[in-house]
Amino acid sequence: MNQKNNELLRVDGLARHFVVERGLLGGARKVLKAVDGVSFSLGRGETLGLVGESGCGKSTVGKLILRLQEPTAGTVSLDGRDVTHVHGSALRDFRRQVQMVFQDPYASVNPRLRAGRIVGEPLENYEKLDAAALEDRVAQLFDRVGLRRDGMHRFPFEFSGGQRQRLGIARALALSPGLIVADEPVSALDVSVQAQVINLMGDLQEQLGLSYLFISHDLAVVEHIAHRVAVMYLGRIVEIGPRKAIFGAPRHPYTQALIAAAPIPDPKARRERHVLEGDVPSPVNPPGGCPFHTRTGWR
């Protein structure tokens, strides 16, 4: 298939700056550049892993794509249409097509609602269904994510962490979106449960043709699920490419250091150790040119 026709999401020059200090006349004196000129594309049925250490701007990119925050600059296009500044009914339509799975399965659900209501809320907001049809749709969503139908009448505290994350996935699937932004969706779960949720997401992608922007700091998880990987540092993407290229032959020294620092299951295996010099520069006063150039010397 033609690459252009297969493209679902395109991000061009996306930036988000926060004023952290103002001058006497109200002008911006200090600006924190959380995201600073990020560009990438995402194909239909593809998973792009967005990785980097805490504070690099990964989650902010996800929020900008979802229109939970407004960008300072740049554009977001979905299915060839610029959605950067849409409002009203156009924004409502956009939210049908793009959904999110949150990091914390405990904080991302309303503890006062029963599980069936949590999953069915998007359907109540967007589709006119009678009570029987709504209950049937919710039951089908429970089946799809591997939850028992009798759990529809239970409260969130009666579910385990993995089950709550399945609730979050079911809720994200309710409106049949094309793109799901998953922000650290398994970081709060036990390792064995992580594998179950990751496998579920992979199965759903095959069955429904979903695209994922998978935000994570866990390289092992990203290596398992992603087709391509983008590496962020200090608000910018420093390397992007196919999974095998990124993990097999990383070119950027920051990517090399990230992969070298990741734990490996074989205790006898050895990796070349890369120790970065200095500290991460402040996003309020980032270095010019490549943001990593102040740390490229090995010691």
Image: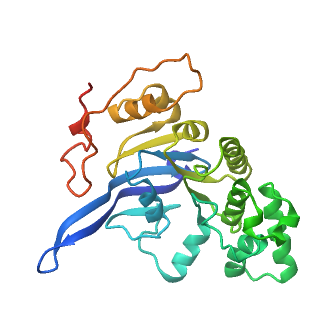
The quadrant in which the N terminus is found is top right
In the displayed structure image, the side of residue 14 where residue 259 appears, left or right: right
Does 10 appear above or below 249? Answer: below
**Which one is in front, 268 or 294?**
268
Q: Quadrant of the C terminus?
A: top left
Quarter assignment of residue 296? top left
**Left or right position of 286 against 251:** left
Q: Hey, which quadrant is residue 283 in on the image?
A: bottom left
Q: Indicate the position of residue 34 as horizontal and vertical percent values.
A: 33, 58
Residue 227: x %, y % from top left: 56, 40
Q: Residue at x 73, y 66 (%)?
A: 157
Q: How is the image coloured?
A: rainbow
Q: Residue 95 location in percent, x, y? A: 57, 71
Above or below, 210 relative to 84:
above
Q: Is 64 placed left or right of 162 in the picture? A: left
Q: Residue at coordinates 27% horizontally, 61% vertically from top-left?
A: 32
User: Percent x, y for residue 50?
Assistant: 47, 47
Residue 66 position (above or below residue 229): below
